[in-house]
Protein backbone atom coordinates (compact mmCIF):
# COMPACT_ATOMS: atom_id res chain seq x y z
CA UNK A 1 0.00 0.00 0.00
CA UNK A 2 1.39 3.37 -0.98
CA UNK A 3 0.16 6.79 -0.04
CA UNK A 4 1.41 10.31 -0.43
CA UNK A 5 2.91 11.73 2.74
CA UNK A 6 1.41 15.07 3.76
CA UNK A 7 4.12 17.70 3.81
CA UNK A 8 4.21 19.74 7.01
CA UNK A 9 6.11 23.03 7.01
CA UNK A 10 6.91 25.50 9.80
CA UNK A 11 3.69 27.43 9.14
CA UNK A 12 1.71 24.28 9.96
CA UNK A 13 3.72 23.92 13.16
CA UNK A 14 2.94 27.54 14.05
CA UNK A 15 -0.77 26.91 13.54
CA UNK A 16 -0.46 23.81 15.73
CA UNK A 17 0.69 26.03 18.58
CA UNK A 18 -2.93 27.10 18.91
CA UNK A 19 -3.55 23.98 20.99
CA UNK A 20 -0.71 24.95 23.31
CA UNK A 21 -2.31 28.41 23.65
CA UNK A 22 -5.56 26.70 24.68
CA UNK A 23 -3.69 24.70 27.34
CA UNK A 24 -2.00 27.85 28.67
CA UNK A 25 -5.31 29.70 28.78
CA UNK A 26 -7.08 26.90 30.65
CA UNK A 27 -4.19 26.66 33.10
CA UNK A 28 -4.38 30.41 33.77
CA UNK A 29 -8.14 30.67 34.20
CA UNK A 30 -8.28 27.57 36.40
CA UNK A 31 -5.33 28.62 38.55
CA UNK A 32 -3.30 25.52 37.77
CA UNK A 33 -0.01 27.40 37.66
CA UNK A 34 1.29 25.39 34.71
CA UNK A 35 1.70 28.29 32.30
CA UNK A 36 5.45 28.72 32.74
CA UNK A 37 6.16 25.00 32.52
CA UNK A 38 4.07 24.67 29.36
CA UNK A 39 5.76 27.66 27.71
CA UNK A 40 9.29 26.59 28.64
CA UNK A 41 8.58 22.99 27.70
CA UNK A 42 7.13 24.01 24.34
CA UNK A 43 10.09 26.24 23.51
CA UNK A 44 12.54 23.50 24.46
CA UNK A 45 10.55 20.98 22.44
CA UNK A 46 10.64 23.16 19.31
CA UNK A 47 14.35 23.96 19.60
CA UNK A 48 15.42 20.42 20.47
CA UNK A 49 13.39 18.72 17.74
CA UNK A 50 14.48 21.26 15.14
CA UNK A 51 18.12 20.66 16.02
CA UNK A 52 17.54 16.91 16.06
CA UNK A 53 15.87 16.98 12.65
CA UNK A 54 18.85 18.74 11.08
CA UNK A 55 21.37 16.65 13.02
CA UNK A 56 19.84 13.33 12.00
CA UNK A 57 20.45 14.16 8.36
CA UNK A 58 24.16 13.95 9.11
CA UNK A 59 24.01 11.30 11.83
CA UNK A 60 22.28 8.83 9.52
CA UNK A 61 25.31 8.96 7.25
CA UNK A 62 27.62 7.74 10.00
CA UNK A 63 29.36 4.44 9.35
CA UNK A 64 31.51 4.37 12.52
CA UNK A 65 29.89 2.26 15.24
CA UNK A 66 32.05 3.83 17.95
CA UNK A 67 30.70 7.29 17.14
CA UNK A 68 27.15 5.94 17.26
CA UNK A 69 27.83 4.33 20.65
CA UNK A 70 29.26 7.62 21.97
CA UNK A 71 26.12 9.43 20.83
CA UNK A 72 23.93 6.91 22.66
CA UNK A 73 26.11 7.19 25.78
CA UNK A 74 25.64 10.95 25.64
CA UNK A 75 21.88 10.48 25.40
CA UNK A 76 21.98 8.11 28.39
CA UNK A 77 23.98 10.66 30.38
CA UNK A 78 21.41 13.38 29.69
CA UNK A 79 18.71 10.92 30.76
CA UNK A 80 20.59 10.28 34.03
CA UNK A 81 20.86 14.02 34.69
CA UNK A 82 17.14 14.42 34.03
CA UNK A 83 16.24 11.51 36.30
CA UNK A 84 18.36 12.94 39.12
CA UNK A 85 16.63 16.29 38.71
CA UNK A 86 13.27 14.65 39.38
CA UNK A 87 14.44 13.14 42.66
CA UNK A 88 13.71 15.06 45.86
CA UNK A 89 16.80 13.78 47.65
CA UNK A 90 19.44 12.28 45.36
CA UNK A 91 21.83 9.88 47.05
CA UNK A 92 25.64 10.04 46.67
CA UNK A 93 26.72 8.82 43.26
CA UNK A 94 23.26 9.13 41.75
CA UNK A 95 24.37 10.16 38.27
CA UNK A 96 26.97 7.40 37.70
CA UNK A 97 24.53 4.75 38.94
CA UNK A 98 21.62 5.98 36.84
CA UNK A 99 23.84 6.50 33.79
CA UNK A 100 25.29 3.01 34.05
CA UNK A 101 21.88 1.41 34.64
CA UNK A 102 20.17 3.26 31.79
CA UNK A 103 23.02 2.49 29.41
CA UNK A 104 23.20 -1.22 30.28
CA UNK A 105 19.45 -1.80 30.12
CA UNK A 106 18.93 0.19 26.94
CA UNK A 107 22.02 -1.11 25.14
CA UNK A 108 21.23 -4.75 25.95
CA UNK A 109 17.66 -4.43 24.65
CA UNK A 110 18.83 -2.49 21.60
CA UNK A 111 21.52 -5.06 20.79
CA UNK A 112 19.04 -7.91 21.15
CA UNK A 113 16.57 -6.25 18.78
CA UNK A 114 19.06 -5.20 16.10
CA UNK A 115 21.36 -8.23 16.17
CA UNK A 116 19.07 -11.13 17.08
CA UNK A 117 15.47 -10.10 16.44
CA UNK A 118 15.86 -8.19 13.17
CA UNK A 119 19.02 -10.07 12.15
CA UNK A 120 19.69 -7.75 9.23
CA UNK A 121 22.88 -5.75 8.55
CA UNK A 122 20.68 -2.71 7.82
CA UNK A 123 19.55 -2.75 11.46
CA UNK A 124 23.14 -2.03 12.50
CA UNK A 125 23.22 1.33 10.76
CA UNK A 126 22.73 4.74 12.38
CA UNK A 127 19.29 5.10 10.76
CA UNK A 128 18.02 2.23 12.93
CA UNK A 129 20.28 2.28 15.97
CA UNK A 130 19.93 5.95 16.94
CA UNK A 131 16.10 6.18 16.81
CA UNK A 132 15.64 2.78 18.48
CA UNK A 133 18.26 3.61 21.09
CA UNK A 134 16.58 6.93 21.76
CA UNK A 135 13.27 5.20 22.34
CA UNK A 136 14.83 2.68 24.70
CA UNK A 137 16.69 5.36 26.68
CA UNK A 138 13.69 7.69 26.87
CA UNK A 139 11.40 4.91 28.04
CA UNK A 140 13.93 3.83 30.67
CA UNK A 141 14.28 7.42 31.87
CA UNK A 142 10.60 7.65 32.74
CA UNK A 143 10.65 4.36 34.62
CA UNK A 144 13.89 4.94 36.48
CA UNK A 145 12.74 8.39 37.63
CA UNK A 146 9.59 6.90 39.15
CA UNK A 147 11.42 3.94 40.66
CA UNK A 148 14.25 5.93 42.21
CA UNK A 149 11.94 8.31 44.04
CA UNK A 150 9.54 5.51 45.01
CA UNK A 151 12.42 3.49 46.48
CA UNK A 152 13.48 6.37 48.72
CA UNK A 153 9.92 7.06 49.86
CA UNK A 154 9.33 3.36 50.57
CA UNK A 155 12.51 3.16 52.65
CA UNK A 156 11.34 6.22 54.56
CA UNK A 157 7.81 4.93 55.18
CA UNK A 158 9.04 1.40 56.04
CA UNK A 159 12.07 2.55 58.02
CA UNK A 160 11.03 0.83 61.25
CA UNK A 161 10.35 -2.45 59.46
CA UNK A 162 13.64 -2.25 57.57
CA UNK A 163 15.61 -1.60 60.75
CA UNK A 164 13.88 -4.44 62.57
CA UNK A 165 14.91 -6.80 59.77
CA UNK A 166 18.47 -5.50 59.99
CA UNK A 167 18.52 -6.00 63.74
CA UNK A 168 17.39 -9.59 63.23
CA UNK A 169 20.38 -10.30 61.02
CA UNK A 170 19.05 -9.55 57.55
CA UNK A 171 21.49 -7.93 55.16
CA UNK A 172 20.76 -4.70 53.29
CA UNK A 173 19.45 -6.47 50.18
CA UNK A 174 17.01 -8.59 52.19
CA UNK A 175 15.82 -5.66 54.31
CA UNK A 176 15.26 -3.47 51.24
CA UNK A 177 13.61 -6.19 49.15
CA UNK A 178 10.04 -5.02 49.68
CA UNK A 179 10.77 -1.32 48.95
CA UNK A 180 12.71 -2.41 45.86
CA UNK A 181 9.80 -4.52 44.58
CA UNK A 182 7.41 -1.61 45.07
CA UNK A 183 9.83 0.70 43.25
CA UNK A 184 10.20 -1.61 40.24
CA UNK A 185 6.43 -2.04 40.06
CA UNK A 186 5.96 1.75 40.11
CA UNK A 187 8.55 2.26 37.42
CA UNK A 188 6.93 -0.33 35.16
CA UNK A 189 3.37 1.00 35.47
CA UNK A 190 3.48 3.29 32.36
CA UNK A 191 4.91 0.55 30.14
CA UNK A 192 2.56 -2.14 31.42
CA UNK A 193 -0.40 0.21 30.94
CA UNK A 194 0.77 0.78 27.37
CA UNK A 195 0.94 -2.98 26.77
CA UNK A 196 -2.61 -3.37 28.05
CA UNK A 197 -4.22 -0.72 25.83
CA UNK A 198 -1.98 -0.62 22.76
CA UNK A 199 -4.08 -1.12 19.65
CA UNK A 200 -7.32 -0.60 21.57
CA UNK A 201 -7.04 2.88 23.12
CA UNK A 202 -4.12 4.18 21.08
CA UNK A 203 -2.14 3.53 17.94
CA UNK A 204 1.46 3.96 19.11
CA UNK A 205 3.89 6.44 17.60
CA UNK A 206 6.07 4.16 15.49
CA UNK A 207 3.10 2.34 14.00
CA UNK A 208 1.34 5.64 13.29
CA UNK A 209 4.43 7.07 11.64
CA UNK A 210 4.87 4.05 9.39
CA UNK A 211 1.21 3.99 8.40
CA UNK A 212 1.29 7.70 7.55
CA UNK A 213 4.39 7.11 5.43
CA UNK A 214 2.59 4.41 3.45
CA UNK A 215 3.79 1.18 5.10
CA UNK A 216 1.57 -1.90 5.25
CA UNK A 217 -0.32 -1.76 8.59
CA UNK A 218 0.65 -5.38 9.35
CA UNK A 219 4.32 -4.58 8.83
CA UNK A 220 3.92 -1.49 11.02
CA UNK A 221 2.27 -3.64 13.70
CA UNK A 222 5.18 -6.09 13.69
CA UNK A 223 7.68 -3.26 14.04
CA UNK A 224 5.70 -1.88 16.96
CA UNK A 225 5.57 -5.26 18.69
CA UNK A 226 9.35 -5.62 18.48
CA UNK A 227 9.80 -2.13 19.88
CA UNK A 228 7.40 -2.76 22.76
CA UNK A 229 9.29 -5.92 23.67
CA UNK A 230 12.52 -3.89 23.60
CA UNK A 231 11.06 -1.26 25.92
CA UNK A 232 9.82 -3.82 28.43
CA UNK A 233 13.06 -5.79 28.59
CA UNK A 234 15.36 -2.79 28.67
CA UNK A 235 13.41 -1.04 31.40
CA UNK A 236 13.26 -4.05 33.73
CA UNK A 237 17.00 -4.61 33.39
CA UNK A 238 17.76 -0.94 34.06
CA UNK A 239 15.42 -0.69 37.05
CA UNK A 240 16.71 -3.88 38.65
CA UNK A 241 20.32 -2.81 38.23
CA UNK A 242 19.73 0.75 39.45
CA UNK A 243 17.97 -0.40 42.61
CA UNK A 244 20.60 -3.01 43.44
CA UNK A 245 23.27 -0.34 43.18
CA UNK A 246 21.17 2.19 45.12
CA UNK A 247 20.91 -0.22 48.06
CA UNK A 248 24.67 0.11 48.52
CA UNK A 249 24.21 3.88 48.87
CA UNK A 250 21.29 3.83 51.28
CA UNK A 251 23.00 1.35 53.59
CA UNK A 252 26.44 1.35 55.20
CA UNK A 253 28.93 -1.50 54.64
CA UNK A 254 27.79 -2.71 58.09
CA UNK A 255 24.21 -2.99 56.76
CA UNK A 256 22.86 0.02 58.63
CA UNK A 257 20.25 2.31 57.06
CA UNK A 258 21.53 5.80 56.31
CA UNK A 259 18.66 7.84 57.77
CA UNK A 260 20.13 11.13 56.59
CA UNK A 261 19.40 10.17 52.96
CA UNK A 262 15.68 9.63 53.53
Image (cartoon, helix red, strand yellow):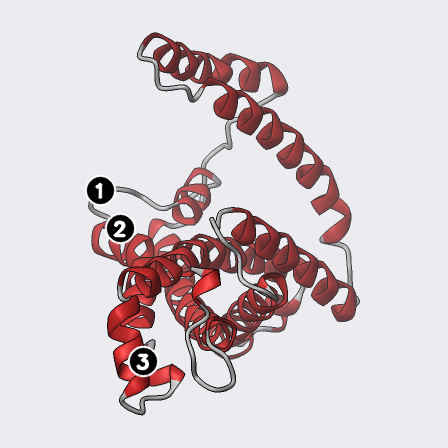
In this view, the residue in front, 252 or 143, is 252
Distance from label 1 to label 3 (Cα)? 40 Å
Residue 58 pos. (x, y %): 78, 48
Give the mark nearer the N terminus: 3 vs 2. Answer: 3
Distance from label 3 to label 2 (Cα)? 37 Å
Residue 104 pos. (x, y %): 56, 73
Q: Is residue 68 above or below residue 14?
A: below
Asked which secondary structure carries label 3, the reply is: helix
Instruction: Judge depth for marks 1 and 3 and give the one in front.
Output: 3
Q: Is residue 93 above or below residue 247?
A: above
Q: Which residue sits at x=29%, y=52%?
A: 194
Asked which secondary structure carries label 1, the reply is: loop
Q: Which residue sits at x=55%, y=47%?
A: 85
Residue closest to the far bottom: 169
Residue 40 pos. (x, y %): 57, 25
Residue 71 pos. (x, y %): 71, 59
Do the numbered discs 2 and 1 sit on residues whose CB atoms are within 8 Å?
Answer: yes
Left-right relation of 36 to 217 = right
Give the mark nearer the N terminus: 1 vs 3. Answer: 3
Q: Which residue sits at x=60%, y=24%?
A: 43
The residue pinned by badge 1 equals 201
Q: Which residue sits at x=29%, y=75%?
A: 162
Left-right relation of 255 to 100 = left
Q: Based on the displayed image, in which of its 4 quarters is residue 192 positioned?
A: bottom left
Instruction: Judge depth for marks 3 and 2 and give the one in front.
Output: 3
Q: Which mark is residue 198?
A: 2
Q: Which mark is residue 175?
A: 3
The answer to whether residue 31 of the structure is visible from this angle is: yes
Do the numbered discs 3 and 2 sit on residues whose CB atoms are within 8 Å?
Answer: no
Left-right relation of 156 to 116 = left
Amino acid sequence: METELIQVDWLNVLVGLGLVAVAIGLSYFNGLGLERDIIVGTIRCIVQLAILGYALVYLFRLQCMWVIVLILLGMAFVAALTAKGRMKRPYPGTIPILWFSIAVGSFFALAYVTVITMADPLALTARYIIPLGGMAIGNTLNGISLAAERFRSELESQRDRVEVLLSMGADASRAAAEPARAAVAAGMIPTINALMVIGLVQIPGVMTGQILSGADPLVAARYQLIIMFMLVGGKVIALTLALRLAVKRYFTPEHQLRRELL
